[in-house]
Every structure is written in structure tokens, then in C-alpha cells.
Image: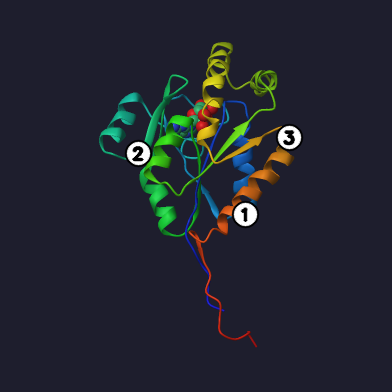
Amino acid sequence: MEQPIRKGMLLVISGPSGAGKGTLAKRLLADDPTFKFSVSATTRGPRYDEVDGVHYHFLTEDEFQERVDAGDFLECAVVHGHRYGTPRAYVRECLERGENILLDIDPQGARSVAAAMPDCVTVFILPPSYEELRIRLHTRNTENENEINRRLGNAKGEIDQLSRYQYAIINTTVEKAIVELKAVVAAEKQRTTRFFPVIPEKNEA
Ligand code: 5GP
């Protein structure tokens, strides 16, 4: 049988800080080798466990602005007081190779990407409650108190953007949420706008 032809999927996930997007993204990337991760650029400083070029491209304000001026970003936005941007070239290269690509970006970025690339798939990850969000942000211990409060303060505004997304997943447990995310991905892979199977005339011998 001839190889089925697939077009790459651009999967955008968003959700408030502490909802568990990062963990879900990591699980999807580990379990589904058809997905690549788009490493964003940011002016935020690295956390103790973050590696430049793996988690983010950590840039100075000037370096970031140079990239903006050069038109290197598919989208960029200020989130929790720092600048973040999606490198355009890598997304384009992946999609041209027929690979799927995952973007973990905020609702402003998701809106820009959806306008530029309307066949992207958008998923919003919710925490089970605001209280749980607060607990998770304190437990993961990656931000100071000011930063946690800023992120909690922005959560309501981000969750208000939910209806702009195609899918919503409540991350009560990672195990449950990853099953739901994979179900979305599995269905979206079979869309006839992305999947062009060619069946042979006869059964294979
Ligand atoms: P964090 O600082 O916790 O890694 O990310 C903070 C927020 O920035 C998250 O909501 C994350 O999705 C978002 N973000 C990360 N990279 C990008 C990007 O390239 N563009 C936009 N618009 N948001 C991003």
C-alpha cells in the first residue's frame, strides 16, 4: 500500500501558570514521537532546572528586540511582565516536513497564531479550582511570592479566554488529562484536511 500522506499539525496549548501545561506537554512529547516542541524565546531569567535552548532561548531585552525587528517571531507577547516569542522558522520547517509541532503559549499568542494559521488545534488546560492553582504554584516552588501572586492575579483573565479555544481539559490528575489530550490529538490527526490516505485497488498479497 502506498504511504498515507499526512500534513503536520500545529497544536497550541494554553492555560494559567500552575495548570500543568508543561507536564502534559512533556508527556505528549515523550509518548508521541510525531510531535516536536517549539522552544520559545524569552527575556525571563532561567529557573534553576532550565537549560538554554531546551526549555527556552533566554535572551536579553536587546537581543529579543533584534529578533522582533528581523521578523523572526510568528507571534510574541508580554506575559507576567516578561517577553515571550515563538520562532517562526522552526514551526515552518516542522510543518513543511509533515511533522506535528506543539506550542505552549499564552492566550494572546494563541490568538495571533490562530489568525495566521487557522488550521491549528487549540487546547486550553484548566486547573480543577483556583485554590488548587494556588497550591500547585506554591508546591512547585519555582517562583517567589511576588511572582506567584502576579501569576495568580493573571489567571482569571487567562481563563476568561477559554471560549476562544477549540478544546478544554481540566487537569485534575495528569493521568486523566493526558488521556484526554491524546484523544484530541488522535481525532485531529484523522481530519481529512490533514490526512490524505490512498488505498490500493487490490488487497495486498
Ligand atoms: P513560564 O514563565 O511559566 O515558562 O511561562 C509563562 C507563560 O508564558 C505561560 O503561559 C506560557 O504558555 C507562556 N509562553 C511561553 N512561551 C511563549 C511564547 O513563545 N509566546 C507566548 N505568547 N507565550 C508564551
Position of the C terminus by quadrant = bottom right
User: Nearest the camera: 141 or 165?
Assistant: 165
Residue 97: quarter of image: bottom left
Q: Kindly tell me whether mark 2's CB lies below 8 Å from ligand 1.
A: yes
Please rate how many residues cluster around mark 2, counting C-alpha atoms within 10 Å: few if below 14, some from 14 to 19, many from 20: some
At label 1, the amino acid type is Ala
**Residue 145 visible, this orientation:** yes
Callout 1: helix, strand or loop? helix
Residue 112: quarter of image: top left
* In the displayed structure image, the side of residue 84 where residue 147 appears, left or right: right
In the image, residue 188 lies at what x, y percent? 56, 53
Q: Which mark is residue 23?
A: none
Please rate how many residues cluster around mark 3, counting C-alpha atoms within 10 Å: few if below 14, some from 14 to 19, many from 20: few
* In the displayed structure image, the side of residue 128 where residue 120 appears, left or right: left
Residue 81: quarter of image: top left
Q: CA distance from mark 1 to mark 2?
A: 28 Å
In the image, residue 96 lies at what x, y percent? 40, 58
**Residue 57 visible, this orientation:** no
Q: List the single residue furthest toward the left.
A: 69
* In the displayed structure image, the side of residue 34 where residue 85 appears, left or right: left
- 157 above or below 64? above
- Identify the residue under disc 3: 173
- Identify the residue under disc 2: 73
Q: Residue at x 46, y 24 (%)?
A: 45
Q: Which tag, 2 or 3, sits closer to the chain's start?
A: 2
Give the number of the mark in front: 2 or 3: 3
Q: Are marks 1 and 2 in contact (CB under 8 Å)?
A: no
Callout 3: helix, strand or loop? loop
At label 3, the amino acid type is Thr
Q: Are marks 2 and 3 in contact (CB under 8 Å)?
A: no
In the image, residue 200 lies at what x, y percent? 56, 81
- Identify the residue under disc 1: 186
